[in-house]
Amino acid sequence: MDTLFYAENRSKSVESMISCSIIGVLIFLQALIFHSPIFADDMKIAQMSAPALSVDTEKITNTILNEFSMERRTQNFNERIKQKYPKAAIVDVERGIKHIRLTKYYDGKPVRINVVEVDLKLANDFELKPALSSTSNNLKSRRTITTIAKNTNSIVALNGTYFKPQTGVPLGTLMIDGKMYTGPVYDRVAMGIFDDGFDMARVQFKSSLKGSKSLVKVDNINQPRMLSTYVIAYSKAWGTTSPASPKYGYQIAIKDNKVVGSSYSSMSIPEDGYVIVGPERLLKPLVQEKTINFEIGTTPDWKNVKHIISGGPYLVKNSEVFVDMTAQKLGAIGGKNPRSAIGYTKDNTMILVAVDGREGSSVGMTLMQLAGFMKSLGCINAMNLDGGGSTVMYVNGQVVNKPFVKGGISISNALVLSKKI
């Protein structure tokens, strides 16, 4: 830590000296251009030449200092990774992106771990976001992580949130590029990705259908029904038709904020529209409305959030180990298993982790062990992702961990790091 502190202070001093030197040189150049005897004898030439030869000192200074600042940030990032993982194999993926392989021992048993750390200020040509397995964004799809990574031109990918094995539909909040594909399950924890950083919280759905005389709460979007009384919206991402109505249920199809059909049974989901399924007593009055607005939101109110991916349980919350497995109804995923996790540090470095398990050379981790590991990496917030047979990490064209099925099983979705378009 002292070494880093010294290096940072030294870099700041060097930066100040460079800044002063740049300014001094630019002032000298301006004086040379505008006060040279060559132009003193011909004011006309001087007047014509001055605008063409003017120097934007502020722009040049900022450009040079920005390049120097990025270089310094890169050096500090590299040094931090070396100190954090002294016995690990470290590979440079791109500037600001490191792949780390290490083995730790818990109760005398080995655990093989792959970590990717990403400083998105350095890797500013890349974007971290969730991706569905289907290129047409159909929720009912599963593909290998290699296929997902290649379809999204990604250099890093980690399996994402839980999904229904029979269909591939993600179970939990999933938003991509501002579009909500699925809503939360059991208010589980999710990570919001913003232009300037991340946030993590247990997310609830806060949405409604509003007409001039009607207001209907919408309980979820594109998720399996938990209660017959729930009102659920189904978009084209769900498929071509809506699921069957619950007992005493009703359905209405909405497109361009207008009711375009209604039924007691399944309906075709309109393009750029949706079908609402719920109790007849709540939905039938909406048929009389001329205009219906579907307002989709979450609690917490994440304004300007670009992407959301859910998981569960928490592993680290506000810099402390925090595993709320029971509260998030995840009691079945205890024990030592392969694990996937994401978290971020106070300076918004993203950390992705894949832990191998269920074999002699890597026995896996408990959730508490994983939580302690994520905290040791400096995460101020971290959460568990789908694990077990789903745990798989892809870096630079290949699967880097050793899942039970070679190359990893087909999965519903992933968190990918790809070049910005």
Image (cartoon, rainbow, N blue to C red):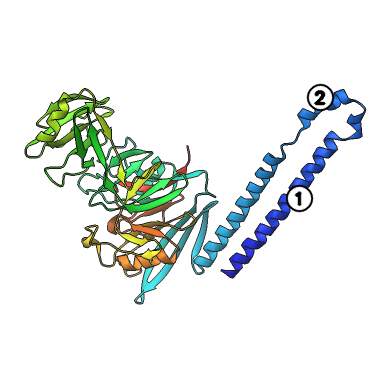
Q: Residue 401: horizontal and vertical position, in percent?
A: 39, 58
Are there few (<14), some (14-19), or many (20+) residues within 10 Å of tag 1?
few
Q: Are there few (<14), some (14-19), or many (20+) residues within 10 Å of tag 2?
A: few
User: Which of 266/218 is in front?
Assistant: 218
Task: Give left or right: position of 405 versus 62.
Answer: left
- In the rendered structure, which amino acid carries the disc numbered 1? Ser
Q: Which residue is mark 1?
A: 21
Q: Amino acid at mark 2?
A: Met
| SS at badge 2 | helix
- Return the x and y of residue 290 as percentages of the image width and height: 21, 22
Assign a secondary structure to mark 1. helix
* Image vertical order of residue 42 relative to residue 332, above or below: above
Q: Up-down: is 366 above or below 179?
A: below
Please indicate whether residue 160 sits to the left or right of residue 232 in the image.
Answer: right
Q: Residue at x 49, y 64 (%)?
A: 89
First of labels 2, 1 by sequence position? 1
Residue 251 percent across, percent down from the top left: 14, 32
The residue at the far front in this view is 213
**Residue at the spot 39% in from the left edge and 58% down from the top edge:** 381
Most distant residue in the left direction: 248
Q: Quadrant of the N terminus?
A: bottom right
Q: Using the numbered discs, state the Cα–Cα distance from disc 2 to disc 1 in whole angstroms.
A: 29 Å
Residue identified by numbered label 2: 48
Quadrant of the image occupied by residue 246: top left
